[in-house]
């Protein structure tokens, strides 16, 4: 059966996830980017689709009205909602009263351990929730059951690991095995994140530590995903380019420590080692055969997004990075976390089953988040941020004011992403 799929993404990381996921299927797929307040730039999209088979020239940028028209005119069989959790409910409302609605997939663009309640709750309207490890499936099923929110959970190999796998994946024989660098003279690549470290003091501490790894003939590259004026999936306060420029001007860091951008897969090809606080790019490094260190200097916990790496054998310090003590991944951890046998993947089988159900009987209306006063108030933020419905109108200043207020409340109380 010929299947048409529409991948809808709203940020750079979700463009990467949705494009690479669709690329693993035999479907005829189109990629659309939702022109909300977190929309990536054309340059970011080009980086995100690198190696996926999608061409940035063929990507459609769409607002809510144009998306409704696209869904009606193209009639996809599958809608891949590669969007942040809070964008799912307002997008699903566009399917109201749509005949023969598509099978809806969703998932988190990277690591979703620890499983967040808002992800489980806000994505409840999807037919299939795609996870990327046995551990993620167990944890998500447990959270969903605890809150009595049914989800059809399906397993898929994290799709961009296939793009990263330019060298055979090597896993250590035991915990904490120190790996021999595959490219001893190549740069060390550091993958920063928007959410951690939480402030410039922490970011500066990491940069100063990375500076000690610079050697004659070996640089350290801070591989950012956005440039000035661009946004990412999670809004952070840090600007590594500006911070590093200040440190260079003060003579605190060597010129061999520098900021770069572009597709992560390209930077990993010549790397001698990889460093992060807790980015899922560590998994890309493992897939590419690049030894890695997940930093413990700032702490190992959910707040630093690195608790999932406990037991991986990858945990280490800035001192380890300075001395070139990079690590390979533990076999047992890898089997349970992101490097399972691809034969265990069942997400496409589950989609095919739902497509058959759709052909026979149609699909029920998507589940809705409970209608409570709190959810109605939060829903205003969800819709304004995801769809930007007032952009280009006289109400746009009010929209931005409401969003700014909602984000302050988010950081203080709601912890929405």
Image: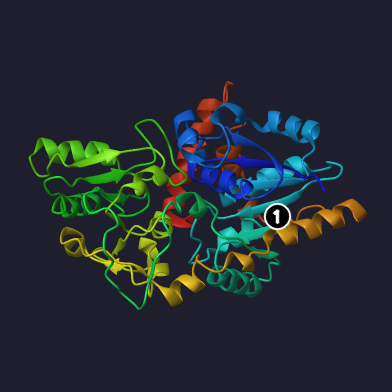
Give the vertical position of 273 relative to 147 (above or below).
above
Where residue 330 appears, x then y in whole percent?
Answer: 39, 73
Where residue 18 appears, x then y in whole percent?
Answer: 59, 46
Residue 191 placement, left or right of 368: left
Can residue 40 be seen by looking at this rendering? no
In front: 230, or 349? 349
Which image quadrant for residue 327?
Answer: bottom left
Give the vertical position of 371 relative to 311 (above or below).
above
Residue 104 placement, left or right of 221: right
Which image quadrant for residue 107?
Answer: bottom right
Residue 26 placement, left or right of 318: right
Q: Farthest right residue?
A: 360
Can residue 55 be seen by looking at this rendering? yes
How many tags in the picture?
A: 1
Disc 1, SS:
loop
User: Residue at 59% across / 21% down in the picture?
Assistant: 393
Q: How is the image coloured?
A: rainbow
Where residue 87 appears, x then y in whole percent?
Answer: 60, 46
Where residue 23 appears, x then y in whole percent?
Answer: 61, 46
Give the vertical position of 120 relative to 268 (above or below).
below
In front: 112, or 159? 159
User: Residue at 92% across / 55% down in the picture?
Assistant: 360
Q: Residues within 10 Å of mark 1 (few under 14, many from 20)?
A: many
Residue labelled with disc 1 = 126
In front: 231, or 342? 342
User: Residue at 73% across / 55% down in the picture?
Assistant: 368
């Amino acid at each position: 059966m010929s299947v048409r799929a529409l991948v809808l993404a709203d940020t750079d990381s979700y463009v990467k996830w949705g494009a690479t996921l669709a690329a693993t299927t035999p479907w005829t797929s189109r990629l659309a980017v939702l022109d909300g307040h977190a929309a990536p730039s054309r340059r970011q999209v080009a980086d995100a689709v690198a190696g996926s088979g999608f061409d940035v020239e063929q990507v459609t940028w769409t607002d809510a009205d144009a998306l409704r028209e696209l869904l009606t005119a193209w009639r996809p069989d599958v809608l891949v909602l590669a969007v942040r959790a809070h964008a799912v409910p307002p997008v699903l409302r566009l399917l109201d009263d749509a005949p023969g609605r598509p099978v809806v997939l969703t998932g988190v663009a990277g690591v979703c351990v620890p499983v967040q309640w808002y992800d489980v709750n806000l994505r409840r309207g999807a037919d299939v929730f795609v996870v990327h490890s046995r551990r993620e499936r167990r944890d998500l099923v447990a959270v969903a059951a605890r809150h009595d929110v049914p989800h059809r959970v399906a397993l898929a190999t994290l799709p961009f690991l296939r793009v990263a796998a330019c060298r055979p994946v090597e896993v250590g024989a035991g915990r904490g095995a120190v790996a021999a660098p595959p490219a001893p003279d190549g740069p060390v690549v550091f993958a920063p994140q928007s959410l951690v470290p939480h402030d410039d003091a922490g970011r500066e501490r990491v940069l100063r530590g990375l500076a000690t790894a610079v050697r004659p003939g070996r640089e350290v590259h801070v591989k950012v995903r956005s440039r000035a004026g661009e946004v990412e999936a999670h809004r952070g306060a840090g600007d590594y380019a500006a911070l590093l420029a200040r440190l260079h001007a003060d003579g605190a860091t060597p010129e061999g420590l520098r900021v770069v951008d572009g597709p992560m897969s390209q930077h990993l090809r010549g790397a001698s080692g990889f460093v992060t606080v807790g980015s899922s790019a560590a998994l890309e490094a493992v897939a590419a055969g690049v030894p890695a260190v997940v930093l413990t200097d700032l702490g190992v916990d959910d707040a630093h997004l690195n608790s999932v790496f406990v037991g991986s054998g990858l945990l280490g310090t800035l001192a380890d990075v300075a001395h070139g003590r990079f690590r390979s991944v533990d076999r047992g951890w890898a089997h349970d976390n992101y490097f399972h046998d691809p034969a265990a993947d069942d997400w496409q089988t589950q989609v095919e089953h739902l497509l058959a159900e759709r052909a026979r009987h149609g699909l029920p209306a998507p589940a809705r988040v409970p209608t409570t006063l709190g959810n109605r108030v939060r829903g205003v933020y969800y819709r304004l941020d995801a769809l930007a419905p007032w952009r280009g109108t006289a109400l746009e200043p009010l929209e931005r004011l409401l969003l700014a207020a909602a984000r302050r409340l988010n950081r203080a109380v709601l912890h929405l992403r």
